[in-house]
Image (cartoon, helix red, strand yellow):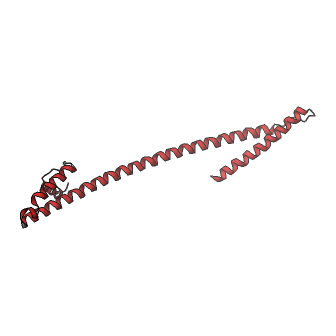
Amino acid sequence: MTASLEHHYRTLGVGPAASDEEVRRAYRRLVQLHHPDHNGGSPEAARRFEQIHTAYEAILRARTAAALERAASVCASERASAIEARVVELERALAAARRARERRERRAARLRRLAQRRPPVASDPALAELNGLIQGLERLASSLDHAIEQDRRAR
């Protein structure tokens, strides 16, 4: 605390630890006591009245500034906490997306391996149906390869 602020507290007759209400009560009591209209227009009372008013304003300004600093500090730390939480959330989402991509790539590779296994050509209708399924798997593997390639390009 500066020397001038200490002087202002002494002018009001309170200490720096006084509550806002105590400071206000001391100010009001002293203003009534030293008001020029209550002291026959005395120049000494007017001077003392002005000192009391100046001291009260200085103390209010200092306390308001301190309260604003505390509030700004709290807001800044809350913003930092919110940003940190969002970063954690985004990191989790990114990890989940990477795992999903890896699963897609593994499935596509598995389907490609299955498609490379060609069944023997036969006239049996069950084998013909199986050949149709395999051809469908080959098309699916091809479309998955295409999707994976587009995903890589997007990054």
Residue nearest the viewer, comparing 56 with 65: 56
Instruction: Look at the picture and state if 6 lies above or below 131.
Output: below
Q: x, y (%) of residue 12?
A: 14, 55
The quadrant of the image that shows the N terminus is bottom left
In the image, taking residue 27 as reference, residue 70 lies left or right, namely: right
In the image, taking residue 29 as reference, residue 149 lies left or right, namely: right
Residue ID at (68%, 42%): 105
The quadrant where residue 99 appears = top right
Query: Is residue 9 among the parts visible in the rendering?
Result: no
Instruction: Look at the picture and state if 55 lies above or below 82.
Output: below
Residue ID at (66%, 50%): 152
Residue nearest the viewer, comparing 56 with 122: 56
Q: x, y (%) of residue 13?
A: 12, 53
The quadrant where residue 132 appears = top right
Q: x, y (%) of residue 61?
A: 24, 58
Residue at the farthest right position: 123
Q: x, y (%) of residue 130?
A: 85, 35
